Image: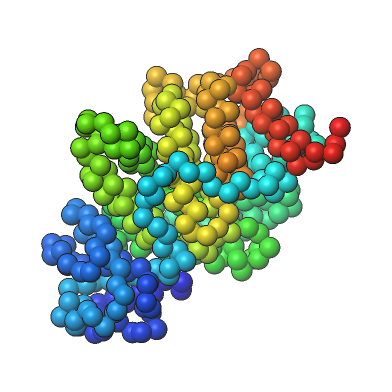
Amino acid sequence: MSNFALIENLEGRRMLHGGLGDGDFVSMVPPAGPKMEAEAVLAYNGLDPVIVAMFSDPDSIEPEEWRTLEKVYVVPESVRGAQPTENPGEPMDVVPADQFQVITTGNGGYFSENYDHLNVGALMIFGVGHAETPEEIDYEDLRDRLQIAVDEGRTPVFDVEHLKVDIDRHSTDEVDRSMLVYQAVIDFARAEFPEVQIGFYGTFPIRDYWTPIYYRRALESVAEGRDDFWAANIQRYTDRYMDWQASNDYLAPLARQVDVIYPSLYTFSDDPQEWQWYAEESIKQAERFGKPVIPFLWNRYHQSNQDLKWQTIDGDFWRLQLDTVRANAAGVAIWDFSAATSVDLDVAADYSTNNAWYNQTVDFFEDIFEEANPDDE
């Protein structure tokens, strides 16, 4: 946590000036129960008490107030980001086509073999087993997997989904312990393979499907002057959005150390508008860490939707997803089952011109190639 100022068990001591500057963002975690009132309080979660506050003058906080705090985290302004925008649909700067990265895993070979002129890269995804402490990580296995990725020219992505990382759902002590595991992976990879780009699947930002959707739906109702449930609850859903943002801020010490942010933007329903809101807000949260953002897409519906589980996504909806990522991110990572998967699917059969999603993917690749090479015939 070297990039994050942390003082534990303050016992009335005042914050050292070396750890806090004007305009810094302070996340304070008091003991369970008391809610500390402070200047410009932005969010408060009553279940796992979290106060996010901004102070222009650290000396204005009295020693007796510091006594109520267990921990004080200081997030530099470069990581802090802004309040939810009033115009959330405003497009971001588009990455030039020749810089937009397209990487695949699972059955990526179906694309790279048939369309090798598109320079489609390959991912290698692997985890750390069920390690819950740095000591439980199998570092030899981690080294071997990283070496394979380097030897095969594939981009390694760490998949660590079993740890508790959301302070909105878990205690800060639990999240802190999880962060030690992430830190150990980063430190090991940096030491053993300094040339390798480091990134974690779906960790930054925390995947939250409904919070950005509810927030955007409420904003839309207010903007259109509707007198409905969503407009009446705009503050409720803005507060929920800010809680999500605070949870993401808590992970900033880790996110600032990776090379690429890989948000997970998988599809949980067949509503394109909902997915687009979810994707746009997730990418915005990811971009606040100041790193290139390459979201993961899956050409199938997530298994949590029992009616649509593992079905391939409609071609037009899939193209919307590709175009949304193209307009808002530095690249796209397309994941799918491998042909050898144990699930009851004929995966290979889905990779043909008989499938609309496949045709849309190839067209998307071709469009990027043509945009990046306008003089090629």
Q: Is residue 366 left or right of residue 186?
A: right
- Could you tell me which residue is drawn at 29 percent across and 79 percent down? 58
The image quarter containing residue 305 is top left
- Could you tell me which residue is drawn at 71 percent across and 54 percent down? 150
The image quarter containing residue 342 is top right
Asked if 298 appears above or below 262 in the picture, the reply is above
Q: Is residue 292 left or right of residue 50?
A: right
Q: Is residue 155 left or right of residue 62?
A: right
Q: Tell which residue pokes out farthest to the right in this image.
A: 377
Q: Tell which residue pokes out farthest to the front in this image.
A: 225
Asked if 35 appears above or below 307 in the picture, the reply is below
Q: Position of residue 205 (x, y in %)?
A: 43, 50
Q: Position of residue 174 (x, y in %)?
A: 31, 59
- Could you tell me which residue is drawn at 52 percent across and 25 percent down? 317
Between residue 316 and residue 110, name the one nearer to us. 316
- Could you tell me which residue is drawn at 43 percent across and 70 percent down? 76
Q: Position of residue 206 (x, y in %)?
A: 40, 49
Q: Tell which residue pokes out farthest to the top in this image.
A: 354
Asked whether the viewer can see residue 74, the reply is yes
For the rendered model, the colour scheme is rainbow
Q: Position of residue 70 (x, y in %)?
A: 23, 71
